[in-house]
Image: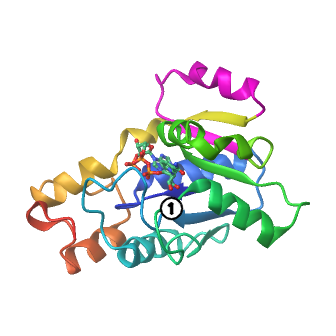
Amino acid sequence: MGGTFDPIHYGHLVTAEEALVQFNLDKVVFMPTGMPVRKTHRMVTSAEHRYLMTVIATASNPDFEVSRLEIDRPGLTYTVDSIKALRDLHGSQVELYFITGADAVWDILTWKESASLAGACTFIAATRPGFDLGRFAEERERGILIETMEVPALAISSTDIRSRFSERRPVRYLLPESVAAYIEKNRLYADGAES
Ligand code: NAP
């Protein structure tokens, strides 16, 4: 599961659990993005903080793991490179799924190197109800495997949570309390600052 996770929240965790069950997966590996290619215009919280928040949020679930693959790779993070790396790591027999938000799947598949993704893995595009999932028809026609999943909990968003921290509005029930405590301790989104 790819994501900037700035910060990770219950929408991401519910999506992962739902995918695990719906697609009968062995495990979900959360892979925080190193340097998000689409976010060079805004400050993104340091990769190490985002990685640690992801570890804290997933620690109690035996089916969840966290990978440093993308945060340890220098330069901008392209999903194409990660899928190749995962394939090299796990071999040709393992069935790989790449789970992320539907808008991000769209970005990945309209990227210039995306032709090499045909057959490389199955994408699981998660979205809140109401998103037009029919927009992937053309990508499917060119051999990209895409499953879609509506997750009502994705009404929760990282952007909203960052604003809530900086404006001192409530965040309880939007993300794990342990992650909220980590954010407070490190003053990650205080005063609108996204360090
Ligand atoms: P984003 O564009 O910030 O997110 C788009 C939407 O998807 C937001 O509503 C976001 O909600 C949601 N989302 C993000 N990750 C999710 C997840 N794991 N589960 C459910 N919803 C999720 O996306 P991003 O976080 O920067 O990127 C997501 C993944 O796509 C990362 O692995 C990234 O590296 C990859 N990506 C790759 C390329 C490329 O290779 N060219 C381009 C774009 C993205 P929240 O903001 O609440 O998370």
Q: Does the beta carbon at disc 1 come under 8 Å from ligand 1?
A: yes
Q: Closer to the camera, 39 or 100?
A: 39
Q: Residue furthest front?
A: 112
Q: Closer to the camera, 121 or 115?
A: 115
Q: Residue at x 41, y 60 (%)?
A: 5
Q: Which percent across, then down, holds residue 25?
A: 76, 55
What residue type is disc 1 on?
Thr
Q: Residue at x 55, y 73 (%)?
A: 60
Relative to residue 179, is residue 36 depicted above or below?
A: above
Residue corresponding to mark 1: 77
Relative to residue 163, is residue 147 depicted above or below?
A: above
Looking at the image, residue 25 sits to the left or right of residue 40; the answer is right
Q: Is residue 25 magenta?
A: no
- Considering the numbered disc 1 on the image, is that residue within a helix, a strand or a loop? loop
Relative to residue 92, is residue 55 depicted above or below?
A: below
Looking at the image, residue 171 sits to the left or right of residue 142; the answer is left
Q: Residue at x 37, y 38 (%)?
A: 155
Q: Is residue 26 visible?
A: yes
Relative to residue 182, is residue 109 depicted above or below?
A: above
Q: Is residue 123 magenta?
A: yes
Looking at the image, residue 35 sits to the left or right of residue 150; the answer is left
- Read off the magenta span: 122-143
Q: Which percent across, then down, holds residue 146?
A: 69, 35
Q: How is the image coloured?
A: rainbow
Residues packed near mark 1 inside 10 Å, few (<14), some (14 to 19) or many (20 plus): some
Q: Closer to the camera, 55 or 50?
A: 50
